[in-house]
Image: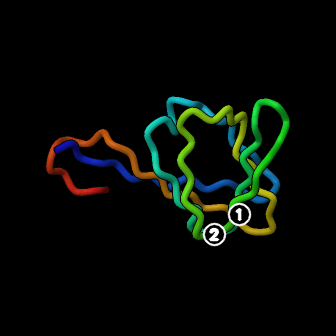
Amino acid sequence: MPGFVRRTVTIAPGHARPADGLEWAEALVLVAHGAVELECAGGSARRFAAGSLIWLRGLPVRALRNPGPGDAVLVAVSPGGPPGAPIT
């Protein structure tokens, strides 16, 4: 059974993080604090509040934007660690 890797990404209020498809390809993402807007390649956007779970695979996301006022904290869990390793 493959292991998993956890990482935390913080986006400051009013800032955006370009969406790299490889970075999020297999990740299940929890909006742990604040809110994030997924800006799609076609210009539309969808907002997700704290507690939301997001699966980005196959979505045409251009950027992850924090509408503020506080930090948006995302916790992503994806496969990739050695088998049997704890989620770190």
Judge whether 35 appears above or below 81 on screen. Answer: below
Q: Position of residue 34 (x, y in %)?
A: 68, 68
The residue under label 1 is 35
Q: Real-space Cα distance between discs 1 and 2?
A: 6 Å
**Mark earlier in primary sequence (1, 2):** 1
Identify the residue at horizontal 19%, vertical 41% (top origin).
Answer: 82
Amino acid type for the residue under numbered disc 1? Ala
Q: Position of residue 48 (x, y in %)?
A: 69, 60
- Which secondary structure lies at badge 2? loop
Query: Along the horizontal axis of the image, is 71 left or right of 88?
Result: right
Q: Position of residue 22 (x, y in %)?
A: 50, 29
Q: Position of residue 60 (x, y in %)?
A: 68, 32
Identify the residue at horizontal 68%, vertical 36% (top origin).
Answer: 61
Identify the residue at horizontal 54%, vertical 59% (top origin).
Answer: 53
Query: Along the horizontal axis of the image, is 10 left or right of 41?
Result: left
Query: Along the horizontal axis of the image, is 30 left or right of 87?
Result: right
Q: Judge by depth and name the residue closer to the eye, 20 or 56.
A: 56
Quarter residue 17 falls in:
top right
Amino acid type for the residue under numbered disc 2? Ala
In the drawing, what numbered circle is on residue 52? none
* Dots 1, 2 in contact, CB < 8 A: yes
Judge whether 75 appears above or below 4 on screen. Answer: below
The residue under label 2 is 50
Q: Quadrant of the N terminus?
A: top left
Identify the residue at horizontal 81%, vertical 58% (top origin).
Answer: 67
Quarter residue 81 falls in:
top left
